[in-house]
Image: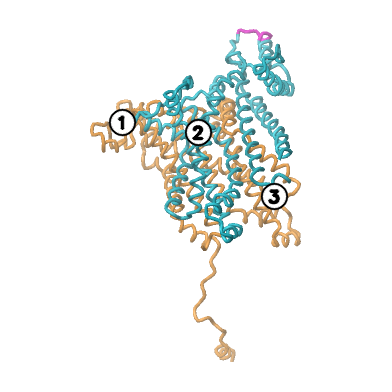
Amino acid sequence: MLTFTIRRLILAVPTLLFISLVIFLLLELAPGDPMAQVPLTVPPEVKAKMREALGLGEPLHIRYWKWLVQFFWIEPQVLFDSIFDTSFSEGKQRILSWQTRSPVMDMVVQRLPQTLWVVGMSYVVGILIALPIGIYSAYRQYSIFDQAGTFVTMIGFSIPPFFTGPLLIMIFAVQLGWFPSVYDTTHVVNDWDSFMVQLRQMIMPVMVLALQTTAQISRFMRSSMLDNLNQDYVRTARAKGLPEKVVVMVHVLRNSMIPVVTAIALGIPGIFGGAIITEVVFKVNGIGDQLLNALFANDLPSVQTLAFMIAVLIVLFNLIADVLYGVLDPRIRYD
Amino acid sequence: MTETLEKKIEPLQDLEPSEPPHSQWKDVWDQFKKHKGALMGGSFLLLITLGVLFGEYIWTLDPQKLDIRNKDIRPIYTILWDSGAKVQWAHPFGTDNLGRDALANMIVGGRTSMAVGWVAMLLALSIGTTIGVLAGYFRKLDGPLMRFTDLVLSLPILPLLLVAVTLFRDALRAHLGPETGMFLLIVGVVGVTSWMQTARIVRSEVLALKEREFILAARSIGTTPGAIIRRHLLPNVISPIMVSATLGLATAIITESALSFLGVGFPPDFPTWGKMLADAVPRMDQYPERVVLPGMAISLTVLSVNYLGDGLRDALDPRIRGR
């Protein structure tokens, strides 16, 4: 199991390099000049110096290499320093935002928890709702519950988050006044009341994202359970007198989870995309919101780092899903 | 002489004429008809496509015409619960804050959304099918192409789309004009980032088909790989391609609307459903219909496409058909 995990971890390195190259080249090939806003009266040699100050003077491959070094070597050192109070990163150049002239990663660290809270909670909530629905509607195929579940998941598939978000705000924040329409990230949870406030402001963003997850995962769960319920080993299990609960919840469920885990992993990029929209709708100041702001301000180092941070998160969650896959299916481990 | 002989020896005949053999597509249609949701989804999609294509000849109001006297008119159904609401039969869906007719805008906006959806879907399908067939048929290409597909699958799609559209839009607008440039850019980026599922499905189908006898027969009489792919493989993978086409159409429409919603879509005077929805969000407590109508249009279109896909999957799967 350990070697399997390590192998997956090593496989993630080229993936990350590829993604970083795609992001870097995309920004590099884009037309548009960060010096375009500088007045024409500035002489060309001063402009050339300003470009160098922004780090634009070097050729392509050197800038890519330097960015890689900054991201994978210097920034981890800063993290290490701040945890263990050492000084490895002293005097080293960090990735600076053109907008605020401060290190991008500092802002990412401030904003990442909000995104992870909302995205993580919604994914967990979505999966927790989806699995029982999928299991039950497969077990009672073509029952009323199954038909209704199919219809609801179809709707969940089809309604995009930028429509459910405003719709929920309209119904629950404006008309009924149950939940706040804006997510207050400065809110501190220190007692029961403030916890309830936090809970109430999280419900809407989490539900918007969870609706999509639920729809997809429960469909996968249902079809995967249906595939397994007709297998011979299920008949064997029943024939040797195991209670129905054990047959379904242990034998069938564990085998059915294998493709579902893949589906869960494949859904992660989508959920981060949905998170950007949800953050805009509910004004959560997470990294998706920061990405949009940096993009509109033409702050290329921030855009680069943020897009790559999202990619790192996706790869990380895919890795977790992969390892889980190995736990569920022993055949995978020894390939 | 011959006549009498023919009369004497009559060929053996069945008592009743047997059913004429029916084609595969008739079977598919019969199965498809049984799926009520798919039938309804298909007809609704047809209706909405015809509506956005030919709607402007029936509803001839100019969507861009400003009519400031008749601004902020509510849709006609508001009168059911609010008798004092400002409604007019001349504007059944109401008007916006500049007096532009909402129905005319919905028609024009829908045309853009549908056009983006269709073209991006076709682009994604052709890329996906090409890569899938190549990877499935040529063993040497299989490894690299599928590794590449996996890599693309782990890209953060929406952030990359945002970055690409924001950075490239000015240049493309300057070269190709605001509308064409934006259309090509959005279609391009959506198409280029959504072919992976099709490629995977097509590859696995081709891998299975390649080992069948008819391919062996074709190869043994000297058919070139290109001809085998065109004549024998592609017709046999048409059903998974059609199913993923419906999925692709739905994704493309949603992605275009999401980009418009985030403010990086088409130029401001060029309505699409996503853009109308996004523009209406700040005043949605007063005019909820401006969010609900385009949102419903997007959702219903996508819902009907999804149901259509569900029905097609059942109808095209020979294991389910006939049950």
The answer to whether dots 3 and 2 both sit on one chain is: yes
Q: Say if the magenta span includes residue A43.
A: yes
Image vertical order of residue B219 relative to residue A258, above or below = below
Q: Which residue is mark 2?
A: B258
The answer to whether the residues at label 3 and label 2 have Cβ atoms under 8 Å apart is: no
Residue A184, percent across and down? 46, 22
Question: What amino acid type should be assigned to the residue bearing mark 1?
Answer: Ile
Q: Which residue is mark 3?
A: B136
In what element is the residue under mark 3? Answer: helix
The answer to whether dots 1 and 2 both sit on one chain is: yes
Q: Residues within 10 Å of mark 2 (few under 14, many from 20)?
A: many
- Whether residue B31 is visible here, answered yes or no, is yes
Q: Nearer the viewer, residue A247 or A137?
A: A247
Q: Tag 1 or tag 3, which sits nearer the N-term?
A: 1
Identify the residue at horizontal 42%, vertical 28% (top origin).
A200
In what element is the residue under mark 2? Answer: helix
Q: Nearer the viewer, residue A103 or A244?
A: A244
Q: Which residue is mark 1?
A: B73
Q: Is residue B225 left or right of residue B306?
A: right
* Visual hue assigned to chain A: cyan
The answer to whether the residues at label 1 and label 2 have Cβ atoms under 8 Å apart is: no
Image vertical order of residue B7 relative to residue B158, above or below = below
- Separation (CA) of disc 3 from disc 1: 57 Å
